[in-house]
Amino acid sequence: MIDVKLIREQPNLVKEGIRKKGTDPSIIDKFLELDLKKRRLLQEIENIRAKKNAAEKKMSLAGNKEAILEALKEAKAFLTEKGEELEAIEREWKDSLSLIPNLPLTSVPEGKDESENIVLREEGVKPVFNFIPKDYLTLAEDLDIIDTKRAAKTSGSRFGFLKREAALLESALLCFLFEKLIKKGFTPIIPPVLIKHFPFWGMGYLDRGKEEVYFLEKDELYLIGTAEQIIGSMHLDETFEKEELPKRYLGFSSCFRREAGSYGKDTKGILRVHQFDKAEMFSFSRPEDSQKEHEFLLSLEEEIMKNLGIPYRVLLICSGDLGDPAAAKYDIEAWLPGQNNGKGEYRETHSTSNCTDFQARRLNIKFKNEKGRKEYVHTLNGTALAMGRAIIAIIENYQTKEGKIKIPKVLWRYTGGIKIIPSLKR
């Protein structure tokens, strides 16, 4: 959540910020009405409580004790009634505050949706084929390394089996990432994939977008949609020493998404599925360092793509395409030459977001600054690799005329010497 003091003191600034994100600014007026009502009620309760305390002191003195007892009884009943009223208002106050998204940084371009995102640069050399390149699913099915037909029998649509060299590729990619990013100061972590309501809410993914989430009602647990959701909340109610920051994690997990808003999109294959594996970078940073840390995460994503030899482009995401927690965001889109009937197109493989103190305020995660005072940390996340999409990019960019797939050289040491698909027995 954003700072309540900022909403009270600069409501127009907050309104303008959330307007840029496509949120109705009138929710600020509603919140301020509730906030005023809550503060007035609190004052009223405090006044009556003070009078009650004064009356209780008089009980020890001579006087009409019966009248004082009656006054105390009335005060107690009033406080009980007003206490219940306050609880109801505080729930509404919290719900209203939860609907206010993080404000975009001043560096974020204004725009309504993804069509207004800005392409900053294109990197890498697109492969040139002396044949019409095939899409990854055609190649993968011919090589029997991705099986969506059998997955449909066992699990339904938007699932797939990774088989043979595809499974080996995922293992190789993970080993490559862990070795690379541990050297960059990241702590490897494999988190639970089930999360409680409060920490999930604290990360900012339930107030909107709840339709994307799998919920196990009997257990009151959610399946995570990305490792960042549970890594970010693992330090709730904790305070870092300033020397600990930045605190960087590399989490690997299965991720689960309903894809409720993608009806009819990418229904075949494994580009958009309900379950996938992903390696995610997460960082806790000092506020003054978070923009620099954001650029650092982006640089690592680009370095990974260059190591794999995948052409890509970098996008600066406009205000209207930012999720609630994000104050700024970059995307990376890989070049997939087999898409669009062999004409090729860019598809998203990475994102990295600076969520400033939005998540930390909800989860009460702080650090001690140079003066020993506690401040909220800034939180950042960035895709290291979404495994399915990385495999897709490798298949399409490294295909041969014979329908084989070359494996990027950087992965050879992790594949047991296998350099081309097919290599394993069929």
Image (cartoon, rainbow, N blue to C red):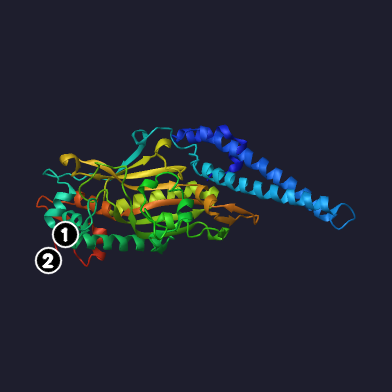
Q: Residue furthest right?
A: 62
Q: Residue at x 27, y 48 (%)?
A: 272
Residue 260, located in which quarter of the rendered image? Answer: top left
In the rendered image, is residue 125 in sight?
A: no
Instruction: Tell whether 199 sits left or right of 34.
Output: left
Quadrant assignment, res 57: bottom right
Q: Amino acid at mark 2?
A: Lys
Q: Amino acid at mark 1?
A: Ile
Q: From mark 2 to mark 1, how far is it between C-alphas?
A: 13 Å
**Residue 187 rendering spot, x and y as whole percentages:** 43, 63
Q: Quadrant of the C terminus?
A: bottom left
Mark 1 lies on residue: 420
Q: Is residue 309 above or below residue 25?
A: below
Residue 340 in the image: state x and y as whole percent: 19, 39
Dot 2 or dot 1, earlier in sequence: 1
Q: Looking at this view, is 308 or 265 the one in front?
A: 265
Within 10 Å of the Cα at label 1, are there few (<14), some (14-19), or many (20+) other Cα atoms? some
* Residue positioned 52% across, 41% down in the render: 96
Q: Residue furthest front?
A: 66
Nearest to the observer: residue 369 or residue 163: 163
Q: Which mark is in front, 2 or 1?
A: 2
Q: On the image, numbered disc 2 is attached to which residue?
A: 425
Q: Is residue 96 above or below residue 368?
A: above
Q: Secondary structure at mark 1?
A: strand
